[in-house]
Amino acid sequence: MIRVQRQDFDVGAELAALSGDNRGIGGVCAFVGLVREMAGGEPLRSMSLEHYPGMTEKALARIEAEARERWPLEETLIIHRYGKLEPGERIVLVATASARRQAAFESCNFIIDWLKTKAPFWKLEQTGGGAEWADARDSDGAAAARWFRDAKGKQLD
Amino acid sequence: MKIIYFAWLRQKTGVSEEDASPPETVTDVAGLTGWLKGRGGGFAEAFDDLSVVRAAVNQEHVGMDHAVSAGDEVAFFPPVTGG
């Protein structure tokens, strides 16, 4: 399931709803991304997350579908927020549920890695020195690229 | 053709969305960036360094050699920074 929303989410409630009555699930893995208090060595006041409505949902759905093709997953959930966020606030939740933990761990890691380089979101960081667009990190590209090794000859561009 | 700009490309061009009719000589994304750059001002600035510009055609990531045509939705934006 994909949700792109302005409002916060309740991690506990989301995870409970994700597994629901599915007794085939043996493990749920969750990643929660938060707004860090520092941006480029300066204290962050707030951040504004902009996205490309329509393409965002498509990109996230493709990443989710790719994960479900690669791992035996019972349930998947991606919630990504947009709009103004302050340090400490939740930005993103990725949760995967599977019969066995390894598939849940690996697919959760995969989804957040690919999300960071493929989903059309942009962060505008507000510090005492003004507002600046966050730069993409080379390390995020490398983190996403390592999953290509396991691709079944198929890439998601 | 609908053209959408995000993040600093929107700020530099001063446009978030427009309906444009590039000449027939514009057949791919690279050609479109060249035509937009030719408008000068904020557009010239926005498309000055294409190594930091990414594009999508009809909401799919594409390379600069991807074809564009009249009915397309084309978007320009910097490398993504979500998550």
Image (spheres, grey):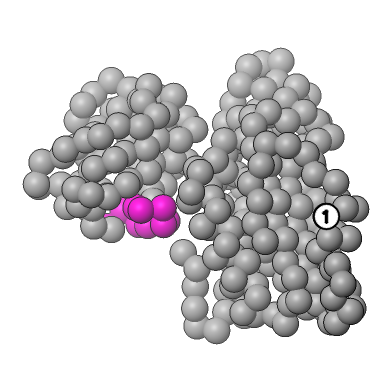
Q: Can residue A73 be seen in this view?
A: yes
Q: Measured from the top left, where is residue A7 in percent x and y?
A: 73, 37
Residue displayed at 68% across by 28% down: A84
Which residue is disc 1 drawn over? A14
**Depth check: A11 or B55 in front?**
A11
* Image coords of residue A51 (percent x, y): 54, 40
Work out whether residue B20 or residue A16 is closer to the camera in this orientation and state it.
Answer: A16
User: Quadrant of the image for the N terminus of chain A?
Assistant: bottom right
* Label 1 environment density (alpha carbons within 10 Å; few <14, some 14–19, many ≥20): some
Q: In this view, does A142 lie above or below A102?
A: above
The segment highlighted magenta reads: B57-65
Determine whether the residue tagged by mark 1 lies in a helix, strand or loop. helix
Left or right of A35, for residue A24: right
Relative to B83, A22 lies left or right:
right
In this view, A79 is above or below B20: below
Q: Is residue B58 magenta?
A: yes
The quadrant holding residue A43 is top right
**Horizontal side, residue A130 vs residue A31: left or right:** left
Badge 1: chain ID: A
Residue A49, above or below A72: above
On the image, the x and y values in percent for residue A148 come to: 57, 74
Q: Residue furthest front?
A: A21
Q: Residue at x 37, y 37 (%)?
A: B4
The residue under the point 57% across, 43% down is A121
- Place of residue A141 in the rendered image (x, y in percent of width and height, measured from the top left): 59, 57
Query: For the residue marked with disc 1, what is the amino acid?
Result: Glu
Residue depicted at 61% across the width and 21% down the height: A131
Q: How many labels does the image show?
A: 1
Tell which of A61 and A109 is nearer to you: A61
The answer to which of A42 and B81 lies nearer the viewer is B81
Could you tell me if residue B51 is visible in this image? Answer: no
